[in-house]
Amino acid sequence: MTGNFPYLVVGILFVMGFIGIIFEKNLVKIAIAVSVVEAATNLFIITLGYRSGGSIPVWTMAGGGSSRMVLPTPQALTLTAIVIGLATTALMLSFAMTIYRHYGSLDVRDVRRLQG
């Protein structure tokens, strides 16, 4: 029995990532914090689809259709979210590399010269 433990882990990961996004000044650390928030979201989606005593969502004749199956939709959504998360992480890191080449720093405070 897992109880509410996965939801607690999701909450802790999400808060850690959100604090990193808000308070970090290094662009690479901000990208890592966004990845942590994405991981928390993926864990939340998988946790919602969990069913105690469920079997894998593959059509078989085993059990005569009386066994409870785990929902396949959250798993498909999570796989899609992982691919999208990989693309956004790559885009954020490429932006960080471009900013580093242009400004010579990954600090957000140095890049604020773009305003105004």
Image: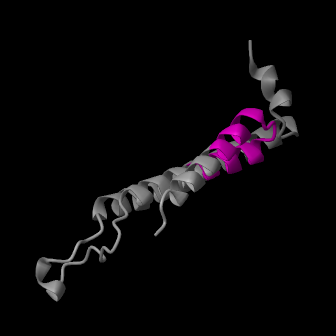
- Where does the image place residue 105, in percent across and percent down from the top left? 87, 39
Q: Is residue 73 magenta?
A: no
Above-or-below relation of 65 to 49: below
Please say which color scheme the image uses. Answer: one colour
* Furthest-bottom residue in this view: 62
The residue located at (31%, 76%) in the rendering is: 56
Classified by dominant secondary structure, the portion drawn in magenta counts as helix
Is 32 located above or below residue 100 in the figure? below
Q: Quadrant of residue 57?
A: bottom left
The part of the chain drawn in magenta is 15-37
Along the horizontal axis of the image, is 113 left or right of 52? right
Residue farthest to the top, as pictured? 116
Residue that extends furthest to the left in the rendered view of this protein: 64
Q: Is residue 31 magenta?
A: yes
Q: Residue 5's quadrant in the figure?
A: bottom right
Residue 77 spot, x, y in % from top left = 37, 56
Q: Where is residue 60 in the image (x, y as percent from the top left)?
A: 18, 84
Q: Can residue 39 be seen by looking at this rendering?
A: yes
In this view, the residue in front, 1 or 44, is 1
At which x and y percent is residue 87? Answer: 54, 53
32 sits left or right of 89 in the view: right
Q: How many labels does the image show?
A: 0
In this orientation, which residue lies closer to the viewer: 112 or 6?
Answer: 6
Q: Residue at x 46, y 70 (%)?
A: 1
Q: In this view, does 86 lie above or below 27?
A: below
Inspect this view and state whether residue 87 appears.
no
Nearest the eye: 110 or 55: 55
Residue drawn at the location 57% of the way across and 52% of the way down: 8
For the point 49% across and 55% down, the residue is 42
| Quadrant of the drawing holding the C terminus | top right
